[in-house]
Image (tube, rainbow, N blue to C red):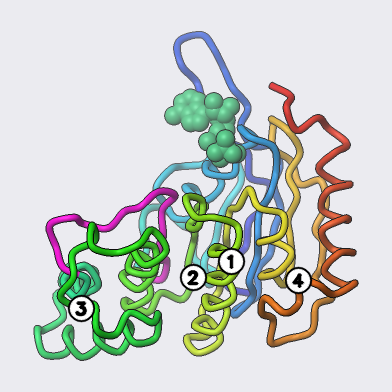
Amino acid sequence: MILDVQNLTKVYTSGDKEVIALQDINLQVEKGEFISIVGPSGCGKTTLLEIFSGLRSATAGSVKVKGREVKGPLQEIGIVFQEESTFSWRTVLENVEFGLQMQGVKKAERREKSHEMIKLVGLEGFEKSYPHQLSGGMRQRVAIARTLVTEPEIVVMDEPFGALDEQTRLLLGGELLNIMDKTNATVVLVTHSIQEAALLSDRIVVLTARPGQIKTVIPSTLPKPRDASALTTDEFAFITQKIWSNLEEKSLLSK
Ligand SMILES: Nc1ncnc2c1ncn2[C@@H]1O[C@H](COP(=O)(O)OP(=O)(O)OP(=O)(O)O)[C@@H](O)[C@H]1O
Protein backbone atom coordinates (compact mmCIF):
# COMPACT_ATOMS: atom_id res chain seq x y z
CA MET A 1 0.00 0.00 0.00
CA ILE A 2 1.43 3.38 -0.99
CA LEU A 3 -1.17 5.75 0.44
CA ASP A 4 -3.10 5.08 3.63
CA VAL A 5 -5.75 7.54 4.80
CA GLN A 6 -7.35 6.83 8.17
CA ASN A 7 -10.33 8.65 9.68
CA LEU A 8 -9.40 11.93 8.03
CA THR A 9 -11.44 14.96 9.06
CA LYS A 10 -10.87 18.60 8.11
CA VAL A 11 -12.60 21.51 9.78
CA TYR A 12 -11.91 25.05 8.55
CA THR A 13 -12.31 27.75 11.16
CA SER A 14 -12.63 31.41 10.33
CA GLY A 15 -13.65 33.66 13.22
CA ASP A 16 -16.45 31.87 15.05
CA LYS A 17 -17.54 30.02 11.91
CA GLU A 18 -16.65 26.38 11.38
CA VAL A 19 -16.93 24.52 8.10
CA ILE A 20 -16.59 20.75 8.18
CA ALA A 21 -15.02 20.15 4.78
CA LEU A 22 -14.20 16.46 5.12
CA GLN A 23 -15.48 13.88 7.58
CA ASP A 24 -13.99 10.53 8.44
CA ILE A 25 -12.36 9.66 5.13
CA ASN A 26 -10.75 6.22 4.90
CA LEU A 27 -8.92 5.23 1.73
CA GLN A 28 -6.12 2.82 0.90
CA VAL A 29 -4.35 3.11 -2.44
CA GLU A 30 -2.04 0.47 -3.91
CA LYS A 31 1.10 1.27 -5.90
CA GLY A 32 0.35 1.83 -9.59
CA GLU A 33 -3.39 2.40 -9.04
CA PHE A 34 -5.27 5.20 -10.81
CA ILE A 35 -7.86 6.65 -8.43
CA SER A 36 -10.35 9.38 -9.32
CA ILE A 37 -12.24 11.47 -6.83
CA VAL A 38 -15.58 12.94 -7.87
CA GLY A 39 -18.25 14.76 -5.91
CA PRO A 40 -20.44 17.86 -5.78
CA SER A 41 -18.83 21.30 -5.86
CA GLY A 42 -17.46 22.30 -2.47
CA CYS A 43 -17.42 18.76 -1.04
CA GLY A 44 -13.73 18.96 -0.18
CA LYS A 45 -11.94 17.37 -3.16
CA THR A 46 -9.20 20.00 -3.41
CA THR A 47 -8.82 20.01 0.37
CA LEU A 48 -8.32 16.24 0.28
CA LEU A 49 -5.57 16.51 -2.35
CA GLU A 50 -3.89 19.31 -0.42
CA ILE A 51 -3.81 17.15 2.70
CA PHE A 52 -2.49 14.14 0.73
CA SER A 53 0.28 16.35 -0.65
CA GLY A 54 1.28 17.77 2.73
CA LEU A 55 0.25 21.30 1.74
CA ARG A 56 -2.49 21.42 4.38
CA SER A 57 -2.86 19.69 7.70
CA ALA A 58 -5.78 17.54 8.76
CA THR A 59 -7.88 18.34 11.83
CA ALA A 60 -8.06 14.67 12.79
CA GLY A 61 -6.93 11.35 11.37
CA SER A 62 -3.80 10.45 9.49
CA VAL A 63 -2.29 10.23 6.01
CA LYS A 64 0.64 7.90 5.45
CA VAL A 65 2.76 7.56 2.34
CA LYS A 66 4.68 4.29 2.29
CA GLY A 67 4.00 3.93 6.00
CA ARG A 68 5.31 7.38 6.94
CA GLU A 69 3.03 10.09 8.31
CA VAL A 70 2.73 13.05 5.90
CA LYS A 71 3.77 16.21 7.74
CA GLY A 72 4.73 18.44 4.81
CA PRO A 73 5.48 18.27 1.07
CA LEU A 74 7.28 15.06 0.07
CA GLN A 75 9.54 14.38 -2.89
CA GLU A 76 7.56 11.20 -3.58
CA ILE A 77 4.49 13.28 -4.45
CA GLY A 78 4.17 15.37 -7.61
CA ILE A 79 1.32 17.80 -8.11
CA VAL A 80 -0.40 18.99 -11.29
CA PHE A 81 -2.62 21.93 -10.54
CA GLN A 82 -6.08 22.92 -11.67
CA GLU A 83 -5.43 25.72 -14.08
CA GLU A 84 -2.57 26.27 -16.41
CA SER A 85 0.51 26.47 -14.32
CA THR A 86 3.25 26.76 -16.90
CA PHE A 87 5.75 29.61 -16.55
CA SER A 88 5.04 32.00 -19.40
CA TRP A 89 8.60 33.37 -19.44
CA ARG A 90 10.21 29.95 -19.82
CA THR A 91 10.36 27.78 -22.93
CA VAL A 92 8.85 24.29 -22.94
CA LEU A 93 12.27 22.79 -22.19
CA GLU A 94 12.96 25.28 -19.41
CA ASN A 95 9.51 24.63 -17.92
CA VAL A 96 10.07 20.88 -17.87
CA GLU A 97 13.57 21.30 -16.44
CA PHE A 98 12.29 23.43 -13.57
CA GLY A 99 11.46 20.64 -11.11
CA LEU A 100 14.81 18.97 -11.67
CA GLN A 101 16.57 22.29 -11.25
CA MET A 102 14.85 22.67 -7.87
CA GLN A 103 16.16 19.26 -6.91
CA GLY A 104 19.68 20.32 -7.81
CA VAL A 105 20.08 17.93 -10.74
CA LYS A 106 23.08 18.82 -12.95
CA LYS A 107 22.44 20.50 -16.27
CA ALA A 108 23.40 17.66 -18.63
CA GLU A 109 21.22 15.13 -16.79
CA ARG A 110 18.41 17.68 -16.54
CA ARG A 111 18.47 18.24 -20.28
CA GLU A 112 18.49 14.56 -21.12
CA LYS A 113 15.62 13.66 -18.78
CA SER A 114 13.56 16.66 -19.92
CA HIS A 115 14.01 15.82 -23.59
CA GLU A 116 12.86 12.25 -22.91
CA MET A 117 9.79 13.44 -21.03
CA ILE A 118 8.93 16.00 -23.71
CA LYS A 119 9.01 13.18 -26.25
CA LEU A 120 6.81 11.01 -24.05
CA VAL A 121 4.09 13.67 -23.80
CA GLY A 122 4.23 14.28 -27.57
CA LEU A 123 5.83 17.73 -27.61
CA GLU A 124 9.00 16.90 -29.52
CA GLY A 125 9.90 19.83 -31.78
CA PHE A 126 8.35 22.38 -29.39
CA GLU A 127 11.23 22.53 -26.90
CA LYS A 128 12.02 26.15 -27.70
CA SER A 129 8.40 27.36 -27.87
CA TYR A 130 6.90 29.54 -25.16
CA PRO A 131 3.55 28.57 -23.56
CA HIS A 132 1.60 31.31 -25.40
CA GLN A 133 2.67 29.74 -28.69
CA LEU A 134 0.98 26.45 -27.75
CA SER A 135 -2.64 25.27 -27.53
CA GLY A 136 -4.30 24.78 -24.11
CA GLY A 137 -3.90 21.00 -24.43
CA MET A 138 -0.20 21.36 -25.23
CA ARG A 139 0.34 23.68 -22.27
CA GLN A 140 -1.28 21.11 -20.02
CA ARG A 141 1.11 18.48 -21.43
CA VAL A 142 3.97 20.78 -20.43
CA ALA A 143 2.58 21.03 -16.88
CA ILE A 144 2.24 17.23 -16.70
CA ALA A 145 5.75 16.69 -18.11
CA ARG A 146 7.20 19.15 -15.61
CA THR A 147 5.76 17.12 -12.73
CA LEU A 148 6.46 13.64 -14.14
CA VAL A 149 10.08 14.37 -15.04
CA THR A 150 10.94 14.37 -11.33
CA GLU A 151 9.65 10.77 -11.23
CA PRO A 152 7.21 11.12 -8.33
CA GLU A 153 5.81 7.85 -7.05
CA ILE A 154 2.42 9.46 -6.51
CA VAL A 155 0.99 12.04 -8.88
CA VAL A 156 -1.79 14.16 -7.45
CA MET A 157 -3.87 15.99 -10.06
CA ASP A 158 -6.54 18.60 -9.45
CA GLU A 159 -8.70 18.99 -12.56
CA PRO A 160 -5.63 18.95 -14.85
CA PHE A 161 -7.76 18.92 -17.99
CA GLY A 162 -10.48 21.24 -16.68
CA ALA A 163 -9.83 24.02 -19.17
CA LEU A 164 -10.01 21.69 -22.17
CA ASP A 165 -12.94 20.58 -24.30
CA GLU A 166 -14.36 17.10 -23.55
CA GLN A 167 -12.81 15.51 -26.64
CA THR A 168 -9.30 16.80 -25.94
CA ARG A 169 -9.49 15.97 -22.25
CA LEU A 170 -10.46 12.36 -22.92
CA LEU A 171 -7.76 11.91 -25.56
CA LEU A 172 -5.13 13.51 -23.34
CA GLY A 173 -6.39 11.40 -20.44
CA GLY A 174 -5.88 8.28 -22.55
CA GLU A 175 -2.33 9.40 -23.32
CA LEU A 176 -1.76 10.02 -19.64
CA LEU A 177 -2.65 6.38 -18.94
CA ASN A 178 0.03 5.26 -21.42
CA ILE A 179 2.61 7.46 -19.75
CA MET A 180 1.61 6.22 -16.31
CA ASP A 181 2.00 2.62 -17.46
CA LYS A 182 5.56 3.45 -18.49
CA THR A 183 6.46 5.31 -15.29
CA ASN A 184 4.44 2.99 -12.99
CA ALA A 185 3.26 6.01 -10.99
CA THR A 186 0.22 5.99 -8.72
CA VAL A 187 -2.33 8.67 -9.60
CA VAL A 188 -4.97 10.43 -7.53
CA LEU A 189 -7.07 12.61 -9.81
CA VAL A 190 -9.81 15.06 -8.88
CA THR A 191 -12.19 15.65 -11.75
CA HIS A 192 -15.62 17.09 -12.49
CA SER A 193 -15.89 14.91 -15.57
CA ILE A 194 -17.70 11.65 -14.93
CA GLN A 195 -16.59 10.38 -18.32
CA GLU A 196 -12.96 11.12 -17.53
CA ALA A 197 -13.22 9.33 -14.18
CA ALA A 198 -14.95 6.34 -15.79
CA LEU A 199 -12.40 6.07 -18.61
CA LEU A 200 -9.17 6.48 -16.68
CA SER A 201 -9.64 4.99 -13.24
CA ASP A 202 -9.05 1.68 -11.56
CA ARG A 203 -11.36 2.91 -8.80
CA ILE A 204 -13.66 5.94 -8.58
CA VAL A 205 -14.22 7.47 -5.14
CA VAL A 206 -17.56 9.29 -4.97
CA LEU A 207 -17.86 11.88 -2.21
CA THR A 208 -21.09 13.22 -0.73
CA ALA A 209 -21.96 16.92 -0.62
CA ARG A 210 -20.28 18.83 2.23
CA PRO A 211 -19.16 17.58 4.65
CA GLY A 212 -17.39 15.32 2.17
CA GLN A 213 -17.66 11.69 3.15
CA ILE A 214 -17.03 8.65 0.99
CA LYS A 215 -20.37 7.74 -0.52
CA THR A 216 -19.04 4.76 -2.42
CA VAL A 217 -15.97 3.43 -4.22
CA ILE A 218 -16.62 2.05 -7.69
CA PRO A 219 -14.10 -0.42 -9.12
CA SER A 220 -13.63 -0.23 -12.89
CA THR A 221 -14.56 -3.20 -15.03
CA LEU A 222 -13.02 -1.71 -18.19
CA PRO A 223 -10.36 -3.99 -19.70
CA LYS A 224 -6.79 -2.67 -19.93
CA PRO A 225 -5.10 -1.00 -21.71
CA ARG A 226 -7.83 1.62 -21.63
CA ASP A 227 -8.16 4.33 -24.26
CA ALA A 228 -10.84 6.42 -25.96
CA SER A 229 -12.15 3.35 -27.84
CA ALA A 230 -13.70 2.24 -24.52
CA LEU A 231 -16.09 5.22 -24.65
CA THR A 232 -18.63 3.36 -26.77
CA THR A 233 -18.65 0.12 -24.76
CA ASP A 234 -21.42 -1.17 -22.50
CA GLU A 235 -19.00 -1.38 -19.56
CA PHE A 236 -18.23 2.33 -19.91
CA ALA A 237 -21.95 3.18 -19.97
CA PHE A 238 -22.46 1.00 -16.90
CA ILE A 239 -19.69 2.74 -14.91
CA THR A 240 -20.80 6.27 -15.82
CA GLN A 241 -24.37 5.36 -14.86
CA LYS A 242 -23.14 4.01 -11.54
CA ILE A 243 -21.21 7.22 -10.80
CA TRP A 244 -24.22 9.35 -11.74
CA SER A 245 -26.65 7.42 -9.61
CA ASN A 246 -24.37 7.77 -6.59
CA LEU A 247 -23.88 11.49 -7.19
CA GLU A 248 -27.57 12.14 -7.63
CA GLU A 249 -28.70 10.97 -4.26
CA LYS A 250 -27.59 14.20 -2.62
CA SER A 251 -28.30 17.17 -4.81
CA LEU A 252 -25.35 18.18 -6.98
CA LEU A 253 -26.37 21.77 -6.49
CA SER A 254 -26.76 21.65 -2.73
CA LYS A 255 -24.85 24.20 -0.65
N1 LIG B 1 -9.00 28.14 3.28
C1 LIG B 1 -10.27 27.89 3.57
N2 LIG B 1 -10.86 28.48 4.62
C2 LIG B 1 -12.15 28.21 4.95
N3 LIG B 1 -12.94 27.37 4.23
C3 LIG B 1 -12.41 26.77 3.18
C4 LIG B 1 -11.04 26.99 2.75
N4 LIG B 1 -10.81 26.25 1.66
C5 LIG B 1 -11.95 25.59 1.38
N5 LIG B 1 -12.91 25.90 2.29
C6 LIG B 1 -14.27 25.35 2.34
O1 LIG B 1 -14.19 23.94 2.41
C7 LIG B 1 -15.14 23.31 1.55
C8 LIG B 1 -14.41 22.40 0.57
O2 LIG B 1 -13.64 23.17 -0.36
P1 LIG B 1 -12.81 22.49 -1.54
O3 LIG B 1 -12.21 23.57 -2.35
O4 LIG B 1 -11.91 21.47 -0.97
O5 LIG B 1 -13.97 21.76 -2.35
P2 LIG B 1 -13.98 21.14 -3.82
O6 LIG B 1 -14.77 19.88 -3.72
O7 LIG B 1 -12.60 21.03 -4.35
O8 LIG B 1 -14.80 22.23 -4.62
P3 LIG B 1 -14.92 22.47 -6.20
O9 LIG B 1 -15.39 21.17 -6.80
O10 LIG B 1 -15.97 23.54 -6.32
O11 LIG B 1 -13.56 22.88 -6.69
C9 LIG B 1 -15.88 24.44 0.87
O12 LIG B 1 -17.10 24.59 1.52
C10 LIG B 1 -15.03 25.66 1.06
O13 LIG B 1 -15.81 26.81 1.22
Quadrant housing residue 1: bottom right
Q: Amino acid at mark 3?
A: Glu
Residue at which label 1 appears: 3
| Extreme residue toward the left, this view | 107
Q: Amino acid at mark 2?
A: Ile
SS class of the residue under badge 3? loop
| C-alpha distance separating marks 1 and 4 | 29 Å
On residue 20, which mark appears?
Answer: none
Range drawn in magenta: 76-91
Q: Is residue 98 above or below residue 162?
A: below
Q: Amino acid at mark 4?
A: Leu
Residue 173 placement, left or right of 14: right
| C-alpha distance separating marks 1 and 2 | 9 Å
Please name whichever residue, 238 or 108, is drawn nearer the observer in this view of the structure.
Answer: 238
Quadrant housing residue 225: bottom right
Residue at which label 2 appears: 154
Mark 3, mark 1: which one is toward the viewer?
3
Q: Are marks 4 and 2 in contact (CB under 8 Å)?
A: no
